[in-house]
């Protein structure tokens, strides 16, 4: 009787384990299937943004939208084969879709504009390859006027999520960009700082 109970317990445990494994696989496939859909749409939006002459309305607002968010520019980093639209705001929903503006003025305005993106380690999408960036690597930002400015990375470091010093502008007469993504299981932030190439 005791052995029979033990056997039933192990069978039930294996059943629960198998069901949990199946559910986990389904959730992973769903998550990365959704991410793949966004990646394809990101490529389309980059193409639309690049081809569209009139990107702003009479009020200065972007005419191009992606998943309900205004597109305010493009980011391109050749060293890691990255090109994404930049969304107007950082929210949980926006970050599922693309790179977003976290802090600062308009794209390519003077001062520090900070951009946030997910560190998709498995698919290496969005800012998933930022850890491979080195000093001297180029970042190109295109704004709503169609102007593209090149920035060079001069510093890469890890900081804690509450470090607001990364948002400060060191010199309001220069253009800076700060890339922000999670690292160490979201415990810290990986920061890439870049300055305009004159």
Image (spheres, rainbow, N blue to C red):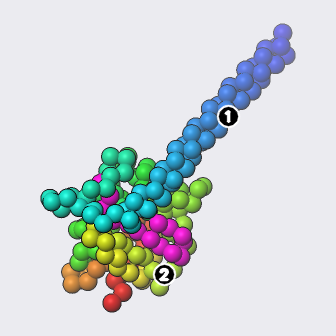
Q: Mark 2 points at which residue?
A: 137
Q: Name the residue under label 1.
A: 21
Q: In which quarter of the image is the N terminus?
A: top right
Measuring 53% from the left and 59% from the top, which residue is drawn there? 125
- Whether residue 183 is visible: no
Residue extending farthest to the bottom is: 198
Disc 1 is placed on an element classified as helix
Query: Relative to residue 24, is residue 163 depicted above or below?
Result: below
Residue 158 image label: none
> Is 72 part of what is drawn in magenta?
yes
- Magenta: predominant secondary structure element? strand
Q: Are marks 1 and 2 in contact (CB under 8 Å)?
A: no
Measuring 62% from the left and 32% from the top, which residue is drawn there? 23
> Is 145 part of what is drawn in magenta?
no
Measuring 71% from the left and 29% from the top, which residue is drawn there? 18
Q: In which quarter of the image is the C terminus?
A: bottom left
Query: Relative to residue 65, is residue 105 depicted above or below?
Result: below
Measuring 47% from the left and 73% from the top, which residue is drawn there? 77
- Whether residue 2 is visible: yes
- Front in this rendered view, residue 194 or 74: 74
Start-end of magenta stretch: 70-83
Q: Give the tally of numbered discs.
A: 2
Image location of residue 121, percent across then percent down: 57, 58
Label 1 crowd bin: few (<14), some (14–19), many (20+), radius 10 Å: few
- Front in this rendered view, residue 104 or 167: 104
Query: Relative to residue 161, is residue 31 depicted above or below?
Result: above
Disc 2 is placed on an element classified as loop
Image location of residue 172, percent across then percent down: 21, 80
Q: In this view, does 176 lie to the left or right of 12?
A: left
Residue extending farthest to the left is: 59
Label 2 crowd bin: few (<14), some (14–19), many (20+), radius 10 Å: some
């Amino acid at each position: 009787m005791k052995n029979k109970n033990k056997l039933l317990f192990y069978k039930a445990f294996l059943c629960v384990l198998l069901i949990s494994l199946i559910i986990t696989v389904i959730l992973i496939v769903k998550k990365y299937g959704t991410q793949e859909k966004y990646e394809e749409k990101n490529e389309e939006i980059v193409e639309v943004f690049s081809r569209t002459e009139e990107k702003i309305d009479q009020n200065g607002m972007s005419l191009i939208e992606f998943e309900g968010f205004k597109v305010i520019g493009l980011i391109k980093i050749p060293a890691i084969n990255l090109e994404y639209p930049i969304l107007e705001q950082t929210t949980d929903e926006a970050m599922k879709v693309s790179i977003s503006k976290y802090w600062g003025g308009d794209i390519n305005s003077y001062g520090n504009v900070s951009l946030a993106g997910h560190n998709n380690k498995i698919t290496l999408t969005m800012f998933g390859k930022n850890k491979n960036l080195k000093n001297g690597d180029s970042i190109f930002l295109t704004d709503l006027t169609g102007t593209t400015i090149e920035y060079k990375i001069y510093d890469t470091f890890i900081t804690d999520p509450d470090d607001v010093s990364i948002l400060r502008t060191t010199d309001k007469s220069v253009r800076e960009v700060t890339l922000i993504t999670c690292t160490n299981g979201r415990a810290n932030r990986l920061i890439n700082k870049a300055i305009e190439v004159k």
